[in-house]
Amino acid sequence: MEKALNGMKPLKVLQDIFDEYGHLFPKRIVLGRYFKNILQDLSSPNTFNDVNDYNKILETLDDLNISYLLTQNGRIIEKNDLHDWIQNNENLEIVEFDNIIPLYEILGIEQQRRIDDILKDNYRIIMTGVTDLKDLNNDDDDHYKRIDFELSFESENYQVFGSIFSKNKSILKRSEEIYVNFGLYDFNGFYAIMKKIKETSIDITECYVSWVVIGKPSQLSVFSPSNRELQVDYIKKTIKLQPDNDKLNYTFDSSFTLHEEYTIFVHANDLSISYEPNNIIKIVEWNERFINVQIESAYETANSDHEDNDCLENEIDLHICILSTNCRYLKIDNAKEECPLNIVGYILDKENFNRSLSQEFESSNVIDPLFTKELPNSL
């Protein structure tokens, strides 16, 4: 059971355990004797009112004209041998299961809690990773990096969030000059698509991409134990961008109370172009209920003459993931280490807290959150 709870595919291992040992467990097992015979006269009213009365059993057998009985295994027991057979305790067998409960209820309270948690049909952190970019060409402005999972998923319904960061000894620094988006998801992995949005001396081959996979364990079959304690809320909304501004601010209602030190992951997919990071998404302000995000054209930032600079006229899918925790670090599956959450996402803090944001709600571009009960064909 611990293997299932601590493994990367807990649902499959749990199913294997239930298939081997069953789903139910009897708390009471009755041992005794089981005999049978086939009566020709089904209308006979004779029954055994007291199976412990041996003489009554013999009398009833005589009335029914039965000279032998059969055990569950088909062994013939002559009527004259019945007494010795009953008295022999070596021949006891299971005749009844009673007080049946689900198998998992025989486990400890903590194991039951962990199983219940795994079986919840909620969005969770499925897997995390850090991947180096040593094989990229630093002279290019756009980069594609294929990232493969160690274990295949059973669905393509998931989302990936993350960032680019550099490492100087033990100090990690998030890159503001290189923006990353994620897409082209399949059962075995995805692509990180990167774009230089500012002139920079940063060598991308010395950088890393952090990534977090969000989805439902019941659909993907994979569920890392590393960050199961973190509560995840996922919001998706399709919005139409306005072409007259290179920077747009949108405010959305989270539909639940936000607190300082919650972590926000956010990215967008341009529906009419590709998974390229055409729009840069940043958290601007927040309060207990609302979050304000800024959407800026990556082409406007990098090159105002880019032929696809009309990307702000397109509809985009805005994906937002909220971690309801004051935890400061995320456990990384493929590196067996921890990564600060402010490297991967945005931490809600006092500096960008705006108590009057709700008063500005009516006059701003507003996104109503869409909390999906079931994942659509594509997140």
Image (spheres, rainbow, N blue to C red):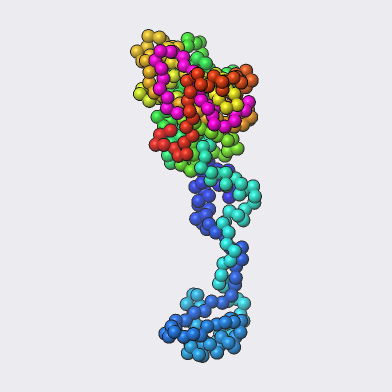
Residue 149 image offset from top left, x and y in percent: 47, 34
- Total labels: the figure holds 0
Residue 228: say if magenta. no
Front-lying residue, 257 or 59: 257
Q: Residue at x 47, y 81 (%)?
A: 37
Position of 139 with respect to 355 (left or right) is left
Vertically, is 150 above or below 26? Answer: above
Front-lying residue, 285 or 72: 285
Residue 263: say if magenta. yes
Asked where in the image residue 106 lies, by quadrant, the reply is bottom right
Residue 229 image offset from top left, x and y in percent: 60, 37
Q: Residue at x 59, y 64 (%)?
A: 99
The C terminus lies in quadrant: top left
State which region is magenta.
237-265
Vertically, is 24 above or below 214? Answer: below
Front-lying residue, 31 or 350: 350
Front-lying residue, 101 or 6: 101
Residue 257 image offset from top left, x and y in percent: 59, 30
Asked where in the image residue 350 lies, by quadrant, the reply is top right
Vertically, is 240 above or below 217? Answer: above
Position of 307 with respect to 237 (left or right) is left
Q: Is residue 299 visible?
A: yes
Q: Residue at x 46, y 30 (%)?
A: 236
Q: Is residue 143 visible?
A: no
Q: Residue at x 47, y 18 (%)?
A: 295
Residue 163 image offset from top left, x and y in percent: 51, 23
